[in-house]
Image: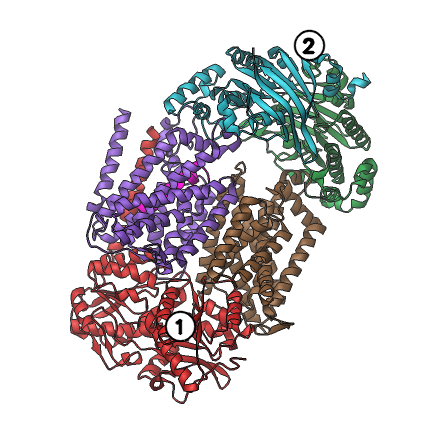
């Protein structure tokens, strides 16, 4: 049972990281290779804010979220958009993909220069607590992480479904020209989507720092997994990202009881490939999305 | 004359929509047939079924009496059916010559041979002057020509033309009609989707009319254009009001 | 007359390249040049599938690893000369490319890229955990040490850098020749056509999947040779270094920054970019942590943003400006055949 | 066609320019002050994930060299000053090789040292061997480094397998002393050269001592989550859990063991992450009573140890670790060899290094006697075991074994509190 | 209201529209007829700002609007119903309509506008929660028109609204358009169904191969022998 509880809590965090990725992909059809680096940046900022102010990490979300939104917004506005514009007529914008990969290199090394390469972790009041739910013990930090992930995903889903901005984002993803004809500012919506996708990372970061260490290459740890989650869940699908994340968390957690932890990594890749070959649109993706 | 192409009870459904509905028709070798019908009647879908882009829900496609249902597009091409696309698909970053050579490679593997074929075809369709121009720099009529040239380069017995005349001005139209006729006279069977009725009539000896995926009329141009059901389908309920 | 000039130029270039070891006497410089040529070679090998056929493979590290490991395992265990082993290694890479290609070439664009990432990362883990494979020692994460036999042409082990220089130079010529052959042959036309529009290509009789597979096989074989060269040069195979993500993405970066889909683009990209990164590291390596990689990333960013067709297009424009209007002929746009 | 020709010129010109750029800038620096300066090339991971470890190694070396130079340099060569030239390996073998090539042929260093990662040491020592330049390997511990019959490679560190040998010795000794029979062992290790090397040694020594390995669990480095591994250990209940981890995973493991209340007789780390200064910051109280194997500790009962460490602390703000000590002591051993070689010629230095026999001075903080065998391996490289314990409410790393080198007044906590419940 | 002067426009290097000039008066219904590929859709997309013209001018009430981005043009009251409906396929009818009301100007009047749309197109009220892509062509066309109306257009541009529809449904669509035009909304209608389109509009333009080859009152055009031959199949 602990195995399942752990799979759930870790999986929810994977899902949270994948959420931003799936949003950006769903709207702009861009695979953002800088997602990991942006997560690292969020964790760095969260950690230092925590260190300097001692604020409760949950309050930090309100500060780091907007910061990362602006970062993402600016990235899209000044880096991605010019390249996207120049490749307007290309069906698969490969340059953007490489651009984000290069951006990841830049960000990681920038962080290395500014923050140094040390591993740090925020030791909050609940960092070392555990919560016992019957026979199952879960660390408080992870439990809160799970709650945050689910709540944020839920709020985010409602935002997409119920607000005008959310609907505009979805509409732009489904048909950008039709959206433009309906008066939606498409470039701006792209930037907002990128900003939101990045801001979601801030939430993941804040959920992570009480129990996971921060260092300049931390993004890489979660990066590939986030990709896998996104494809499993279906590119562009919000519930898919969360459920895909949980699925991966469970595979890792349960799989490791029957094989070595190293081989569960291979298992995860294998599951990913199987889904890709059998149903490329993922568990919840629609074939109309891509 | 023998039947070069035969569609038997061809049907395809997309979700709830039956795009082509129990279509039965055939083409005689060497003839030119027009396929007409309102937008959305299933003409292009029928083409896609013949060349293997879609697999029919039921029914068969026979080419030279051979069942080609279920073959992949490239296999159908090698059997001897060339097609053009309604939305022309030039290889934009290749020159006109290179575009046509791609088709020619269906029959030869030597670049020299392909270049020779391309040169002949460019002469035929009148694109020699544009030989070294990148395809995405061509005008619309030139693209339409290129589209035909690419299909011709695969040396087809049967050529499916999907609205190659649309958007041409009267002079261009006349030239294009002449070109298609001469292709037909070279012994290539032609099946064309066309909206420009006068052109269809000028080229085709026989016309099939589709509406809602079904064949509603078939016959000589005169027969078809005087068929009340056709007029109704084509001109909307105007017919009633007149 | 014009032809003579061009021929002269080509001969001049080849002579200069052949004379490099005479001019560059310090082994370190030669080593740097060799590494640059190796990267140019690998980028060109990737370009066959990634550039010509437009299939964004982010897992080419598999092929360098296959070539290197198979060849060196044969050498270490049975003493089979790498000269023979490289064919086995190349063949193994081709086999793997087919195994990967069959299911993945049905996928388009981003999905294909992600599939190659997953496959290659999975394989890195497997190599890392494999110590023995039948009679062969693989070494797992500890890596594979190439057995030393001293100077031996048969074992491709030299204490001097010069033989390696000529070897990689030859390989680079080879990959350029292969690229040239592909680009001007039926295969090349088919690849570019299917890259432009798969449906239109299929309608013109091109078997899209088979053509992609052939390109992937050639690319895998050439890449595997690069892996063999790496193995004999470095004489130590560390799974993450030879098969890992950085190996895979580096090839892509170099090729695209140089100008993918052209013959010379990846060569230029490979040489220039690895030279630049070497120079940056040379000057800044010991200083502020991460600075040199930061600068490297910024350079790549700038190229992608301002010269998306690659350095080769930029060079083309410069050359055109210097050589005046005479090169603008027949309305052909200047960028079109850059590097062709 | 014409265009292709002109483009070739462009390419050619650029290439020549760039080559000459490198050639020009590289060649300039090494003319002045040659007589009074001996260059030592050091390859370290100054970027990439191991960068912090490279940094502390660099600081330790800098401190030693400052001291040596301030004390008059190498007197037998007219008081020549030692100049350190650092090169970044990025932790990548190929870069390590190319940097070794550069340091030897361009900088013309008298000797190479450093590396941190065994993966970089393996191929880069091979370069040194080829150029017949001595390579002083201070930290990397991979057994094979000195088992390849190389003449120019000297290693100060212990072999990886020695640590595992001594861990086994420690376990049997404790079992006897405290009357807690130990039958089973669980191994948790990162799936890297280091981890796999350790497992090989464990598989040799543990069964020899009558211990059964009931769990062998490799995991990928920098894991996002190690709970599954911990839960497996909880289920299999080995008497002892032994681990090989870098710091991030070490901290994650420690915390997760605490969360899930896994309580074997002992947790034993194998240096690396468990010895990292940030380990305690990351793992917190959960690290209490963890054992770790090491070669040096700030509290180790050896001469000079305290003084040097205090000096380092003052200079850089944190304590040394074993790697830093090896790097630091290594500089003194190199200086000693240079002094005896009385020359900056690589061959002479090699001979001097081979003849090294130091049993006094600052190197005592590492080993009573410094001497290399014919393979270049330091004989009797020291090994200690320490334990995380709270002293006055503050977590400290306390050297507890062997008796003679243990912190004065320390005691071992064995078994792990609550074990067996 | 709208005046277009010497407009040249197209995709990439290809000029599709050549020297187009036309005028639309407030409250008019204008049709543009022409064969496939003549440039009709290009013309609408250029007015909407999806395509930036190569040269020429587009004026709206004395303001130049060429080179404005599409969302600004929509904000000025020019709303296009694109060819092929282009609904947001994964959204419900209701959501599709709300997207139409995303402009600040129309956001405050969502309620009234919804009432108006549901009154005009009662079918949509019944199908409010249906997902766009599961609807039939005719229903989709209704949603597309309703969605555009939610943006409170001054000029409504419709691109082949009868395409793929049965005559009966096409009739309904044209009837709807007629009703809309009575609401003081200017309509620009692009159609292949020449007879229907010209029957509905006051004036028409004939677009052939990128040029306007004819224009005038609809009745005149309907009786023109060239048009009869080329477009009416008579």
* Horizontal side of residue D164 vs C54, given as left or right: left
The image quarter in which residue E164 lies: top right
**Residues in magenta, as a range:** C36-56
Whether callout 2 and callout 1 share a subunit is answered no
Image colour for chain A is: brown
Q: Can residue C268 be seen by looking at this rendering?
A: no
Give the farthest residue toward the bottom: D409
Q: Nearer the viewer, residue D381 or C310?
A: D381
- Which quadrant is home to the C terminus of chain B? top right
Q: Can residue C9 be seen by looking at this rendering?
A: yes
Chain name for mark 1 = D
D414 over E141 or under it: above or below: below
- For the colour cyan, the matching chain is B
Q: Residues within 10 Å of mark 2 (few under 14, many from 20)?
A: few
Image colour for chain E is: green
Residue pointed to by mark 2? B222
- For the colour red, the matching chain is D
Q: CA distance from mark 2 to mark 1?
A: 94 Å
- For the colour purple, the matching chain is C
- Provide the major secondary structure of the magenta segment: helix
* Horizontal side of residue A114 vs B223, given as left or right: left
Residue pointed to by mark 1? D270
Please say which color scheme the image uses: by chain
* Horizontal side of residue C78 vs E78, given as left or right: left
Residue D222: x percent and y percent?
A: 46, 63
Chain name for mark 2 = B
Residue C259: x percent and y percent?
A: 41, 40
The residue that appears at 69% across and 32% down in the rendered structure is: B17
Q: Which structural element holds mark 1?
A: loop
- Which quadrant is home to the N terminus of chain B? top right
């Amino acid at each position: 049972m602990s195995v399942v509880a752990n799979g759930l809590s870790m999986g929810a965090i994977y899902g949270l990281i994948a959420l931003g990725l799936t949003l950006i992909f769903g709207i702009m059809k861009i695979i953002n290779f800088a997602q990991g680096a942006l997560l690292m940046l969020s964790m760095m900022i969260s950690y230092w804010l925590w260190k300097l102010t001692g604020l409760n990490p949950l309050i930090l979300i309100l500060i780091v979220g907007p910061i990362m939104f602006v970062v993402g917004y600016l990235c899209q506005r000044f880096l991605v958009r010019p390249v996207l514009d120049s490749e307007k007529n290309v069906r698969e914008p490969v340059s953007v993909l490489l651009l984000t990969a290069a951006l990841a290199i830049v960000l990681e090394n920038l962080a290395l220069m500014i923050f140094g390469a040390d591993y740090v972790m925020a030791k909050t009041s609940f960092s070392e607590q555990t919560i016992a739910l019957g026979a199952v013990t879960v660390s408080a930090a992870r439990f809160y992480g799970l709650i945050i992930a689910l709540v944020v995903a839920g709020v985010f889903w409602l935002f997409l479904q119920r607000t005008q901005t959310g609907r505009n984002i979805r509409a732009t993803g489904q048909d950008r020209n039709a959206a433009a004809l309906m008066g939606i500012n498409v470039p701006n919506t792209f930037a907002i989507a990128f900003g939101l996708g990045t801001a979601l990372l801030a939430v993941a970061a804040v959920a992570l720092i009480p129990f996971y260490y921060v260092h300049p290459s931390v993004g890489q740890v979660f990066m590939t997994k986030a990709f896998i989650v996104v494809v499993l869940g279906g590119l562009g699908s919000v519930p898919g990202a969360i459920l895909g994340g949980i699925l991966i968390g469970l595979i890792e957690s349960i799989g490791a009881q029957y094989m070595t932890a190293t081989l569960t990594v291979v298992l995860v890749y294998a599951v990913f490939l199987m889904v890709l070959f059998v149903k490329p649109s993922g568990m919840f993706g629609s074939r109309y999305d891509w | 004359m023998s039947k070069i192409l035969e569609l038997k009870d061809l049907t395809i459904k997309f979700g709830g929509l039956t795009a082509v509905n129990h279509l039965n028709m055939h083409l005689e070798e060497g003839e030119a047939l027009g396929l007409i019908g309102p937008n959305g009647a299933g003409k292009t879908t029928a083409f896609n079924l013949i060349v293997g882009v879609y697999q029919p829900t039921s029914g068969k496609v026979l080419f030279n009496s051979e069942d080609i249902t279920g073959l992949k597009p490239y296999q159908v091409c090698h059997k001897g059916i060339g097609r053009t696309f309604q939305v022309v698909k030039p290889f934009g970053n290749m020159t006109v010559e290179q575009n046509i050579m791609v088709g020619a490679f269906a029959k030869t593997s030597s670049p020299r041979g392909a270049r020779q074929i391309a040169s002949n075809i460019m002469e035929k369709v009148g694109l020699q002057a544009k030989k070294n121009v990148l395809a995405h720099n061509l005008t619309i009529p030139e693209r339409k020509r290129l589209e035909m040239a690419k299909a011709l380069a695969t040396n087809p017995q049967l050529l499916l033309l999907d609205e190659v005349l649309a958007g041409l001005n009267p002079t261009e139209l006349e030239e294009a009609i002449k070109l298609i006729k001469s292709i037909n006279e070279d012994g290539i069977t032609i099946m064309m989707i066309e909206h420009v009725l006068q052109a269809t009539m000028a080229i085709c000896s026989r016309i099939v009319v589709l509406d809602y995926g079904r064949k509603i009329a078939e016959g000589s141009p005169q027969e078809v254009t005087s068929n009340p059901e056709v007029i109704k389908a084509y001109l909307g309920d105007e017919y009633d009001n007149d | 007359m014009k032809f003579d000039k061009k021929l002269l130029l080509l001969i001049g270039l080849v002579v200069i390249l052949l004379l490099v070891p005479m001019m560059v006497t310090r082994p370190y410089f030669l080593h740097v040049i060799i590494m640059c040529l190796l990267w140019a070679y690998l980028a060109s090998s990737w370009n066959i599938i990634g550039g010509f056929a437009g299939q964004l493979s982010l897992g080419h590290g598999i092929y360098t690893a296959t070539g290197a490991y198979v060849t060196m395992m044969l050498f270490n265990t049975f003493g089979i000369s790498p000269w023979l082993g490289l064919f086995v290694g190349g063949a193994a890479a081709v086999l793997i490319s087919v195994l990967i290609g069959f299911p993945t070439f049905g996928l388009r664009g981003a999905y294909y890229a992600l599939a190659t990432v997953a496959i290659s990362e999975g394989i890195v883990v497997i190599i890392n955990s494999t110590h023995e494979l039948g009679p062969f020692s693989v070494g797992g994460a500890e890596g594979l040490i190439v057995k030393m036999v001293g100077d031996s042409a048969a074992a491709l082990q030299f204490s001097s850098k010069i033989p390696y220089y000529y070897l990689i130079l030859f390989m680079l010529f080879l990959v350029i020749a292969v690229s040239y052959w592909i680009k001007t042959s039926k295969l090349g036309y088919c690849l570019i056509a299917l890259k432009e529009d798969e449906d239109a290509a299929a309608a013109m009789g091109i078997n899209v999947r088979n053509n992609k597979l052939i390109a992937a096989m050639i690319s895998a074989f050439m890449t595997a040779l690069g892996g063999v060269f790496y193995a004999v040069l470095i004489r130590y195979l560390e799974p993450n270094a030879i098969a890992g993500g950085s190996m895979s993405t580096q090839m892509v970066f170099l090729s695209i920054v140089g100008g993918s889909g052209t013959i010379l683009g990846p060569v230029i990209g490979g040489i220039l970019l690895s030279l630049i990164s070497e120079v940056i590291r040379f000057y800044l390596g010991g200083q502020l942590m991460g600075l040199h990689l930061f600068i490297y990333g910024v350079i790549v960013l700038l190229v992608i943003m301002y010269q998306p067709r690659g350095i080769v297009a930029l060079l083309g424009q410069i050359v055109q400006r210097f050589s005046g209007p005479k090169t603008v002929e027949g309305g052909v746009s200047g960028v079109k055949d850059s590097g062709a | 066609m014409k265009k292709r020709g002109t483009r070739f010129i462009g390419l050619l010109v650029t290439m020549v320019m760039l080559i000459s750029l490198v050639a020009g800038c590289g060649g300039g620096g090494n003319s002045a002050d040659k007589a009074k300066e001996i260059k030592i090339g050091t390859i370290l991971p100054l970027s990439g994930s191991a960068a912090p470890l490279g940094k502390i190694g660099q600081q330790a070396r800098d401190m030693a060299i400052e001291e040596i130079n301030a004390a008059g340099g190498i007197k037998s060569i007219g008081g020549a000053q030692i100049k350190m030239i650092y090169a970044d390996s990025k932790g990548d073998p190929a870069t390590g090789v190319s940097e070794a090539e550069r340091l030897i042929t361009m900088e013309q260093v008298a000797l190479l040292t450093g590396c941190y990662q065994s993966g970089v040491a393996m191929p880069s020592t091979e370069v040194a061997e080829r150029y017949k330049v001595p390579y002083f390997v201070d930290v990397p511990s991979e057994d094979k480094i000195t088992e390849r019959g190389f003449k120019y490679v000297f290693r100060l560190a212990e072999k990886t397998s020695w640590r595992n040998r001594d861990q086994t010795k420690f376990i049997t000794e404790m079992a006897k002393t405290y009357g807690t029979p130990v039958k089973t062992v669980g191994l948790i290790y990162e799936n890297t050269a280091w981890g796999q090397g350790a497992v090989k040694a464990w598989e040799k020594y543990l069964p020899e001592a009558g211990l059964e390995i009931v769990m062998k669990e490799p995991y990928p480095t920098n894991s996002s989550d190690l709970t599954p591994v911990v839960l497996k250990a909880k289920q299999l209940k080995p008497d002892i859990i032994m681990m090989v981890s870098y710091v991030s995973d070490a901290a994650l493991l420690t915390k997760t063991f605490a969360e899930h209340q896994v309580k074997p007789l002992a947790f034993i780390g194998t240096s690396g992450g468990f010895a990292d200064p940030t380990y305690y910051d990351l793992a917190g109280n959960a690290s209490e009573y963890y054992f770790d194997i090491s070669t040096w500790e700030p509290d180790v009962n050896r001469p000079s140890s305290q003084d040097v460490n205090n000096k380092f602390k003052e200079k850089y703000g944190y304590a040394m670790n074993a790697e830093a000590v090896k790097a630091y002591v290594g500089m003194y051993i190199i200086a000693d060899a240079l002094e005896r070689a009385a020359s900056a010629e690589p061959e002479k230095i090699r001979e001097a290094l081979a003849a090294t026999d130091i049993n006094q001075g600052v190197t005592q903080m590492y080993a009573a006697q410094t001497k290399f065998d014919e393979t270049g391996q330091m004989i009797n490289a020291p090994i200690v075991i320490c334990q995380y314990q709270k002293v006055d409410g503050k977590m400290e790393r306390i050297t507890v074994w062997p008796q003679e080198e243990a912190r004065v007044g320390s005691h071992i906590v064995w078994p792990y509190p609550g074990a067996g419940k | 209201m709208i005046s277009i002067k010497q407009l040249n426009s197209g995709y990439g290097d290809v000029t599709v529209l050549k020297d187009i000039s036309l005028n639309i008066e407030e409250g008019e219904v204008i049709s543009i007829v022409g064969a496939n590929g003549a440039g009709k859709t290009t013309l609408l997309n250029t007015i909407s700002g999806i395509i930036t013209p190569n040269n020429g001018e587009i004026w709206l009430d004395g303001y130049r609007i060429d080179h404005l981005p599409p969302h600004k043009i929509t904000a000025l009251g020019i709303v296009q119903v694109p060819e092929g409906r282009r609904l947001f396929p994964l959204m419900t009818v209701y959501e599709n309509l709300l997207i139409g009301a995303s402009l600040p100007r129309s956001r405050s009047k969502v309620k009234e506008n919804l009432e108006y749309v549901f009154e005009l197109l009662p079918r949509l009220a019944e199908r409010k929660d249906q997902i766009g892509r599961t609807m039939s062509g005719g229903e989709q066309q209704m949603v597309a028109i309703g969605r555009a109306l939610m943006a409170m257009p001054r000029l409504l541009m419709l691109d082949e609204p009868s395409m793929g529809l049965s005559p009966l449904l096409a009739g309904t669509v044209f009837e709807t358009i007629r009703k809309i035009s009575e609401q003081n909304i200017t309509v620009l209608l692009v159609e292949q169904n020449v007879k229907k389109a010209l029957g509905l509009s006051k004036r028409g333009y004939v677009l052939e191969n990128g040029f306007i080859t004819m224009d005038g009152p609809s009745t005149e055009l309907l009786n023109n022998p060239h048009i009869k031959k080329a477009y009416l199949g008579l």
